[in-house]
């Protein structure tokens, strides 16, 4: 397994931006962090004690880039619904309560800071199809601001009740 250190001069790796602030631009949280390929994503390792690392000292690289973009803030609002989120939680399941790094262009390999925004899991999961129906998406985002993502309703089912054809979602899921 090949590891890359972030202390070296800027160099692209699999379309990623390892040092997007320049050689001297990373905060102290980025020192000695290495990257490894993990499926289709990059994962930052050797991060023991880092505020967003798991208990093994790892985090997906896109989360780390977003954390740096947000000046290492320990919380942020969802870009889409403005629900307040944290990077880590003791609630279960954790993915429903923490900041997700949403790729604005839909390209999960584009980890440039300008392409990443904080998102709750619900908005991140529904945005790709719901944006095709702007009025529907805008109305639901406003209402969801006050509802924790873990207890939000099934948006595809509501869309169907509103007469929006979402059969393409089920076809796409069956094809996987």
Image (cartoon, helix red, strand yellow):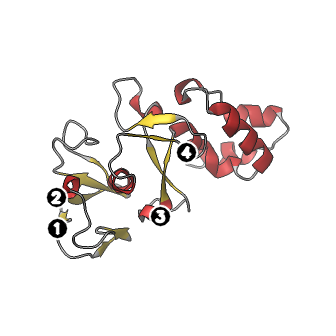
Return the x and y of residue 104 as percentages of the image width and height: 55, 58
Return the x and y of residue 34 as percentages of the image width and height: 19, 59
**In contact (CB < 8 Å): disc 2 and disc 1:** yes
Mark 1 or 4, which is nearer the eye?
1
Task: Return the disc, 4 or 2, that comes first in the chain's sequence.
Answer: 2
> Taking 9 as reference, is 121 above or below it?
above
The residue identified by callout 1 is 7
Instruction: Work out how far the residue at label 3 is from the one at label 1, CA to CA, in angstroms.
Output: 21 Å
The residue identified by callout 3 is 114
The residue identified by callout 2 is 31
The residue identified by callout 4 is 124
Mark 3, secondary structure of its residue: helix
Asked whether 63 or 27 is in front, the reply is 27
Q: Is residue 50 left or right of residue 86?
A: left
Task: Return the disc, 4 or 3, that comes first in the chain's sequence.
Answer: 3
Q: Is residue 132 left or right of residue 147?
A: right
Return the x and y of residue 148 as percentages of the image width and height: 55, 27
């Amino acid at each position: 397994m090949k590891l890359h250190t972030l202390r070296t001069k800027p160099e692209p790796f699999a379309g990623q931006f390892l040092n997007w602030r320049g050689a001297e631009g990373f905060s102290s949280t980025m020192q000695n962090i290495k990257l490894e390929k993990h499926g289709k994503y990059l994962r930052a390792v050797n991060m023991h004690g880092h505020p967003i690392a798991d208990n093994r000292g790892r985090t997906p690289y896109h989360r780390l880039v977003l954390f740096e973009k947000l000046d290492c803030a320990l919380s942020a609002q969802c870009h889409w619904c403005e629900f307040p989120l944290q990077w880590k939680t003791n609630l279960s399941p954790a993915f429903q309560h923490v900041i997700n790094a949403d790729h604005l262009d839909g390209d999960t390999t584009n980890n440039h800071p300008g392409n990443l925004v904080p998102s709750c899991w619900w908005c991140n999961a529904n945005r790709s199809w719901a944006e095709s129906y702007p009025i529907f998406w805008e109305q639901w985002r406003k209402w969801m601001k006050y509802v924790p993502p873990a207890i939000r309703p099934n948006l595809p089912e509501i869309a169907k009740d509103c007469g929006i054809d979402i059969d393409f979602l089920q076809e796409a899921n069956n094809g996987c």
